[in-house]
Structure formats: structure tokens, C-alpha cells
């Protein structure tokens, strides 16, 4: 069975000179945890093409003041097929976070996939 290492969400608020500063996303860890099955499915599909694939992706999820995901980008990692990375980012785009208010926040999420021996 293939199991990713649980992602840890690190909240990095954004700031703006025209809007109030952002607050942390209160439910970031729970929202990321809810995404894990979808992300694991992306990886499992990738294993059908490359059974030895393993690696890490670090994504940045931008959340607006109302909690909607407005952008997801890869900010680091390697070893995963681009199709797997794209799929993981699509899963993250469907996330719904608690409204942080202000100008929104950014959540950085490192996700590691390793083959279990």
C-alpha cells in the first residue's frame, strides 16, 4: 500500500498596503487532511505508469479573504511525474478554507510520497 507522509500546513499571511493584513487560515490543517485521499489517488494513478516513482511536491495555496482558493502553484519538490503534480494541484484548487478575512492568506503544503517496501 502506498501512503503519503501527512502534509503539514504552514500558514504565511499576505499583506497589502490597501487592505487590512490577513489572518491565518484557522482550519488549514483540517482542510489539507480532507484533501489527502484525492492527492493519494493522484499518486496511485501515477504509479500505474511508473511503479518506482516517489518524491515530494511543495505547493502554495492562495486563499482569498472569504476562504476560496484563488491560486495553487508548485514552489518546490521533485521526483513526481508532471501529471501527478498537476492532479495534486487540481485537488488543492477544490479546497474550501475558513475565511481568513483581510486580503487572504497563503498556505504552504509539503507532500511526500514514498513507496512502502
Image (cartoon, grey):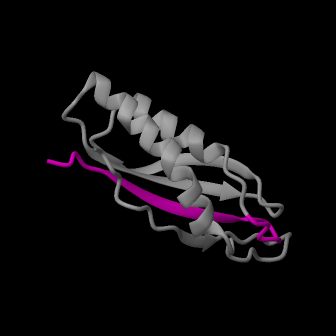
Q: Is residue 30 placed above or below 53 in the rendered structure?
A: below
Q: Is residue 101 left or right of residue 81?
A: right
| Residue under the point 71% across and 58% down | 63
In-front residue for pair 21/3: 3
Residue sitting nearer the eye, 16 or 80: 80
Measured from the top left, where is residue 37 in percent x and y? 50, 47
At which x and y percent is residue 115? Answer: 22, 45
Q: Is residue 27 left or right of residue 7?
A: right
Residue 26, image x, y percentages: 69, 75
Outermost left residue? 117
Q: Nearer the viewer, residue 55 or 49?
A: 49
73 in relation to 32, above or below = above
Which quadrant of the structure image shows residue 110?
Answer: bottom left
What range is drawn magenta here? Answer: 98-117
Residue 100 is one of the magenta-drawn residues:
yes
Query: In the image, what residue occupies the spot 68% across and 71% down?
Result: 25
The residue under the point 68% across, 69% down is 14
Task: Tally the marks.
Answer: 0
Residue 45 sits above or below residue 28 on the image: above
Q: Residue furthest front?
A: 1
Which x, y percent locates residue 77?
A: 34, 50
Query: Is 79 or 76 nearer to us in this picture?
Result: 79
Side of 110 relative to 19 (left or right)? left
At 60% from the left edge and 55% from the top edge, which residue is drawn?
61
Task: Name the quadrant of the N terminus.
Answer: top left
Is 16 drawn above or below residue 51 in the view shown? below
Residue 4 lies in the magenta stretch: no
Amino acid at each position: 500500500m502506498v501512503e503519503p507522509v501527512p502534509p503539514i500546513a504552514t500558514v504565511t499571511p499576505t499583506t497589502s498596503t490597501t487592505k487590512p493584513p490577513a489572518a491565518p487560515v484557522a482550519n488549514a490543517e483540517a482542510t489539507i487532511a480532507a484533501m489527502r485521499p484525492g492527492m493519494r489517488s493522484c499518486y496511485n494513478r501515477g504509479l500505474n505508469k511508473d511503479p518506482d516513482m516517489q518524491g515530494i511536491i511543495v505547493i502554495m495555496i492562495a486563499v482569498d479573504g472569504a476562504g476560496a482558493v484563488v491560486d495553487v502553484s508548485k514552489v518546490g519538490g521533485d521526483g513526481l511525474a508532471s501529471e501527478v503534480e498537476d492532479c495534486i494541484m487540481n485537488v488543492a484548487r477544490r479546497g474550501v478554507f475558513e475565511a481568513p478575512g483581510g486580503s487572504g492568506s497563503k498556505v504552504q503544503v509539503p507532500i511526500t510520497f514514498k513507496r512502502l517496501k
